[in-house]
Amino acid sequence: MKKLLGLLLITVIGFSAQAQEKEKTEVKATTTPAQKVHNTFSKHKHHKGYKVKHKYANGSKHIKKVDERTGEVKRKHKPA
C-alpha cells in the first residue's frame, strides 16, 4: 500500500511541475544590423529598442516595449 501511495505521489508531483512551466518570456530586439547603421548616420532614428513578451499560464499576455534612446517604456496587458 505504501509503494502504491508513493508512486501516486510522485506522479502527481510530476504533473504539477509540468503545469507550472507554461509561463514564457520572449525578448526581441527591434533593430537589424542595417537599421543600426542607418540610425548612426540619419537624423530620423527608427527601430531603437527591444520588446519583451511574457505569456502567463492563465492565457494572459504582458507586452513591454522599451526605447533605448529616450528610456520610454510602453506597457500593454491583454487579459485572457
Image (spheres, rainbow, N blue to C red):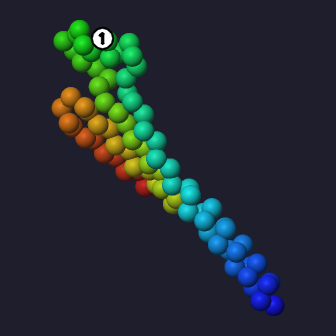
Q: As displayed, is residue 28 above or below residue 18?
A: above
Q: Decide if residue 67 is on the left or right side of residue 28.
A: left
Determine which quarter of the picture holds residue 21: bottom right
Q: Residue furthest front?
A: 3
- Please provide percent x and percent y for residue 79: 43, 55
Residue 59 in view here: no
Q: As displayed, is residue 12 above or below residue 38?
A: below
**Image point (21%, 37%), residue name:** 72
Amino acid carrying label 1: it is His
**Image point (46%, 47%), residue name:** 25
- Please provide percent x and percent y for residue 1: 81, 91
Q: Which residue does the numbered mark 1 point to in the structure image?
A: 38
Q: Decide if residue 58 is on the left or right side of residue 4.
A: left
Sort mark 1 into few (<14), some (14-19) or many (20+) by Cα contacts within 10 Å.
some
**Image point (21%, 28%), residue name:** 69
- Please provide percent x and percent y for residue 50: 35, 33
